[in-house]
Image: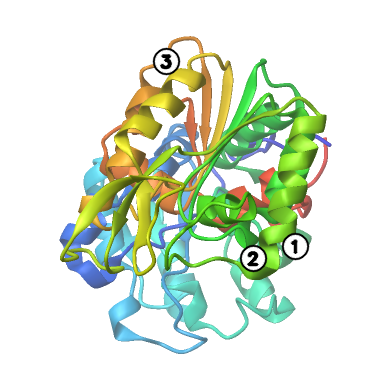
C-alpha cells in the first residue's frame, strides 16, 4: 500500500513534530559527529521543505541506550549544534522532551524556526510505546512526520504510538528509502545481484531466503563466506564457523544452482595468524589451503577483482555487508576494491544496506556514487527481508 507523503500533508504554517534519527557516535566528541553525520545530512531535505512551507519544526530523536534515564553524555545539544552548521540557521535545543519547558519553547516559535527536543530515550515511555508519552509529544504540535527510517522497525511511542493522535506522513528520507529499496525488490532491472558480507550467516538468513529466487548472481564475502566455504568442504583454519548454519548454506547453494543463480565465492583470501588489527603474520592463500591456526580476514585482491568483473554484468546490485573485517584497516581492501568497482558502474542501480556497509561506503567517500545508501541498519535489513516495518505500517494509507 502507498503511504501518505509529506507533500500530501497540510504543513503550511503548522507546528510539525519530525521524528529524525540523530543516533551518531557522540562518544567521539564533535569530531565523531562531523565524521559520521550522514544521518543529519539525510534529514536536511525534509527540514528545508518544512522551512519553505513556513512550518515551525520540532525535531525529536534518540541517542544511544540510556534505558529511560537521563545520561548527561547522551544529550542531543552537540548534535543540534552540528545540524545548525549544516542547515545554515539556528537550531534551539531544549533540555527536555515534554513538559512546561518544551511547551513554552514551542509557543515562542515563529515560522521557519527549528527546535530540537532532548533525547527521547531519557523517557521510559519511548521504547515501551507508552500511550501517555505519545500523547504528551502530540499535545505540543499540529501534525507528525516520520523521517527516521533507521528506527522504523521499532514500534516506539515516537514512531508508532504518536500516529494515533496526529495527522501523519512519511518524510522525504523515509519516502526515498521505501521507494528505492522497494523498486530493487519488486521491479529490479535485470540482471539482479546480491552482494552479501558481514560477520554471520545467521544475520542474513531471511534476507537470502527472500531474495534468492529473483537473483541472477549471489556474491558472498566477509565472515559469511567462511561458513559457505566450509559447507563446500574447504579448509578454513581457525576461522569462526557457524556449525548450525552449514546445512542452510548447502541448501542456499543447491537452490541457487536449481534456480540458475550464479554463486560467487572468493577463490583466494587474506589470512592472519591471529584475529587482530596488527597480527604478526598475514598471507594470501587459496581457499583450499588455509592452515590450522590462521584466520580468514578478507577476500584477496584477485577475488575482489573477480567480483568486480562479474558485477559489471549486472543492472541492479543490492549490497549488504563488508567483504572483510573492514574496521581493521589492514583487512579493508576487499571492501574498498568492490565498493570502488560498484561506484564506477554506469547505468546500474546500486542499493546499499545501512549499518556497517553504509559506514564503509561513507568512510571511502563514495556515498554520492551509489544510487541509494540506506540510513537504516536493522530497518533496511528487515525491509529487504520482506518484513512490515511498524513505523511505516502506522502511517495512513492514501
**Percent of width and height locating residue 35:** 23, 51
Give 296 or 125, whichever is nearer the viewer.
296
Dot 1: within a 10 Å radius of its alpha carbon, few (fewer than 14), some, or many (20 or more) residues?
Answer: some
Q: Identify the residue shown where x is 77% and y is 40%.
A: 254
In this picture, residue 105 sits left or right of residue 336: right
Residue at image position (48%, 67%) is 240
Q: Nearer the viewer, residue 282 or 341?
A: 282
Position of residue 92 relative to residue 232, above or below, is: below
Element class at badge 3 = loop
Mark 3 or mark 2, earlier in chain: 2
C-alpha gap between disc 3 and disc 2: 46 Å
Q: Quick check: can you spot residue 125?
A: yes
Q: From the viewer's perspective, is 245 left or right of 21? A: right
Asked if the residue at tag 2 contacts the one at tag 3, i.e. Cβ–Cβ closer than 8 Å, the answer is no
The residue beneath circle 2 is 138
Dot 1 corresponds to which residue?
165
Badges 2 and 1: C-beta atoms under 8 Å apart? yes
Question: Within 10 Å of the Cα at label 3, are there few (<14), some (14-19), or many (20+) other Cα atoms?
Answer: some
The quadrant holding residue 296 is bottom left
Work out whether mark 1 precedes mark 3 in sequence or the reverse, and give the earlier one: 1
Quadrant housing the C terminus:
top right
Chain-order first, disc 2 or disc 1:
2
* Residue extending farthest bottom: 69
Neighbours of disc 2 within 10 Å: few (<14), some (14-19), many (20+): many
Q: Along the horizontal axis of the image, is 152 left or right of 51?
A: right
Q: CA distance from mark 1 to mark 3?
A: 46 Å
> Residue 345, labelled with which disc?
3
Quadrant of the image for the N terminus? top right
Amino acid at each position: 500500500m502507498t503511504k501518505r507523503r509529506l507533500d500530501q500533508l497540510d504543513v503550511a504554517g503548522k507546528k510539525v513534530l519530525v521524528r529524525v534519527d540523530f543516533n551518531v557516535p557522540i562518544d567521539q566528541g564533535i569530531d565523531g559527529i562531523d565524521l559520521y553525520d550522514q544521518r543529519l545530512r539525510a534529514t536536511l531535505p525534509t527540514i528545508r521543505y518544512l522551512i519553505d512551507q513556513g512550518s515551525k519544526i520540532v525535531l525529536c530523536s534518540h541517542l544511544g541506550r540510556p534505558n529511560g534515564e537521563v545520561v548527561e553524555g547522551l544529550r542531543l545539544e552537540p548534535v543540534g549544534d552540528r545540524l545548525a552548521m549544516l542547515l545554515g540557521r539556528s537550531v534551539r535545543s531544549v533540555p527536555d522532551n515534554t513538559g512546561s519547558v518544551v511547551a513554552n519553547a514551542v509557543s515562542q516559535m515563529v515560522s521557519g524556526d527549528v527546535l530540537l527536543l532532548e533525547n527521547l530515550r531519557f523517557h521510559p515511555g519511548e521504547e515501551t510505546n507508552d500511550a501517555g508519552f505519545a500523547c504528551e509529544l502530540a499535545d505540543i504540535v499540529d501534525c507528525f512526520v516520520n523521517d527516521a527510517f533507521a528506527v522504523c522497525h521499532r514500534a516506539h511511542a515516537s514512531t508508532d504510538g504518536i500516529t494515533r493522535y496526529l495527522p501523519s506522513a512519511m518524510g522525504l528520507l523515509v519516502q526515498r528509502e521505501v521507494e528505492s529499496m522497494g523498486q530493487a525488490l519488486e521491479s529490479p532491472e535485470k540482471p539482479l545481484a546480491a552482494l552479501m558480507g558481514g560477520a554471520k550467516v545467521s544475520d542474513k538468513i531471511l534476507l537470502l531466503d527472500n531474495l534468492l529466487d529473483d537473483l541472477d548472481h549471489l556474491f558472498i564475502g566477509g565472515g559469511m563466506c567462511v561458513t559457505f566455504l566450509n559447507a563446500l568442504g574447504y579448509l578454513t583454519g581457525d576461522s569462526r564457523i557457524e556449525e548450525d548454519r552449514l546445512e542452510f548454506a548447502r541448501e542456499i547453494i543447491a537452490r541457487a544452482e536449481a534456480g540458475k543463480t550464479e554463486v560467487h565465492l572468493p577463490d583466494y583470501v587474506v589470512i592472519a595468524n591471529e584475529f587482530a588489527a596488527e597480527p604478526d603474520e598475514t598471507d594470501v592463500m587459496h581457499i583450499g589451503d588455509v592452515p590450522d591456526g590462521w584466520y580468514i580476514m578478507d577476500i584477496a585482491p584477485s577475488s575482489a577483482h573477480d567480483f568486480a568483473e562479474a558485477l559489471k554484468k549486472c543492472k541492479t546490485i543490492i549490497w549488504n555487508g563488508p567483504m572483510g573485517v573492514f574496521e581493521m584497516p589492514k583487512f579493508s581492501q576487499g571492501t574498498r576494491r568492490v565498493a570502488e568497482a560498484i561506484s564506477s558502474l554506469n547505468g546500474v542501480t546500486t542499493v546499499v544496506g545501512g549499518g556497517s556497509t553504509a559506514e564503509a561506503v561513507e568512510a571511502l567517500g563514495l556515498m554520492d556514487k551509489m544510487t541509494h545508501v540506506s540510513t537504516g541498519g536493522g530497518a533496511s535489513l528487515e525491509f529487504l527481508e520482506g518484513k512490515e516495518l511498524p513505523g511505516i505500517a502506522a502511517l495512513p494509507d492514501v
